Image: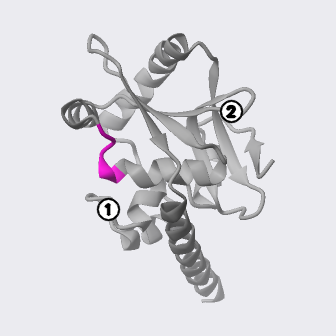
């Protein structure tokens, strides 16, 4: 298996530290320049800081709805999923804190419970570009042919997309993330030497 499961509860201080010690899926769009709200330099500063970011109201709402959304998704697909922290065996910095992975590792899902993403997916029938890197990063960690992208808001129709693995994009992603990781290690090393 090209990855291991790290036994951490998502949202705990230990989980936050594990995320800080690698590159996670939600970091990918920022590193690739696809995140309209944060630059790669901002992320570098975040990763070098010991302070943890505080979730905004939309993130807190999404986190609160995620278990309910996962149950709805499980009912839809007929398979049980668990949140998991996955780490590449080959590149220890390559990590993904996934919303759901099937017990046998044959399927993975990214769940979104926000109004904005729901509206975009409902209008376009496609994953917003600023989430594409996140999905491909997950597929770089867990070598599957696709990932499910599931949008859920109570009282609205569920939106379920299957996103194919894109080897060309993953190649560019891993190269760019590796350079980012090397830069981050250099900054941390210089800080220790001061």
Which secondary structure is most common in the magenta stretch? loop
Question: What residue span does the magenta drawing correspond to?
Answer: 126-130
Separation of residues labelled 2 and 1 (CA atoms): 32 Å
Is residue 20 at all visible to an observer of this figure? yes
Residue at the spot x=31%, y=14% of the render? 154
Residue 9 picture location, percent across and down: 65, 34
Colour scheme shown: one colour
Position of 37 relative to 81 (above/below): below
Q: How crowded is the residue under tag 1: few (<14 C-alpha within 10 Å), some, or many (20+)?
A: some
> Does the CB distance between marks 2 and 1 fall below 8 Å?
no
Q: Secondary structure at mark 2?
A: loop
Disc with the residue nearer the chain's start (2 vs 1):
1
Q: Which mark is residue 79?
A: none
Residue at the spot x=78%, y=57% of the render? 89
Q: Secondary structure at mark 1?
A: loop
Residue at the spot x=81%, y=47% of the render? 1
Residue 74 shown in magenta: no
- Marks 2, 1: nearer the viewer: 2
Read off the residue under disc 1.
38
Position of 124 relative to 34 (above/below): above
Q: Is residue 36 left or right of residue 41?
A: left
Q: Nearer the viewer, residue 194 or 23?
A: 23
Q: Is residue 158 left or right of residue 173?
A: left
Residue at the spot x=76%, y=63% of the render? 90
Residue 56 picture location, percent across and down: 32, 41
Residue 135 picture location, percent across and down: 48, 47
Read off the residue under disc 2.
106
Position of 178 relative to 148 (above/below): below
Residue 165 picture location, percent across and down: 53, 49
Q: Quadrant of residue 97?
A: top right
């Amino acid at each position: 298996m090209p990855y291991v499961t790290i036994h951490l509860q998502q949202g705990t201080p230990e989980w936050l530290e594990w995320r800080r010690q690698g590159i996670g899926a939600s970091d990918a769009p920022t590193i690739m320049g696809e995140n309209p709200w944060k630059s790669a330099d901002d992320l570098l500063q975040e990763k070098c800081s010991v302070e943890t970011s505080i979730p905004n109201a939309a993130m807190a709402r999404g986190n609160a709805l995620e278990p309910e959304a996962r149950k709805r998704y499980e009912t839809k697909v007929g398979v049980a999923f668990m949140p998991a922290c996955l780490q590449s065996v080959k590149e220890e910095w390559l990590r993904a804190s996934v919303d759901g992975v099937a017990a046998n590792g044959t399927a993975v899902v990214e769940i979104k419970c926000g109004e904005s993403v729901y509206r975009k997916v409902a209008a376009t029938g496609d994953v917003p570009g600023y989430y594409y890197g996140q999905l491909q990063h997950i597929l770089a960690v867990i070598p599957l042919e696709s990932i499910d992208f599931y949008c859920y808001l109570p009282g609205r129709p569920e939106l379920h997309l299957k996103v194919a693995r894109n080897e060309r994009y993953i190649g560019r992603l891993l190269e760019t993330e590796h350079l980012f990781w090397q830069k981050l290690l250099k900054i941390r090393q210089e800080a220790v030497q001061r």
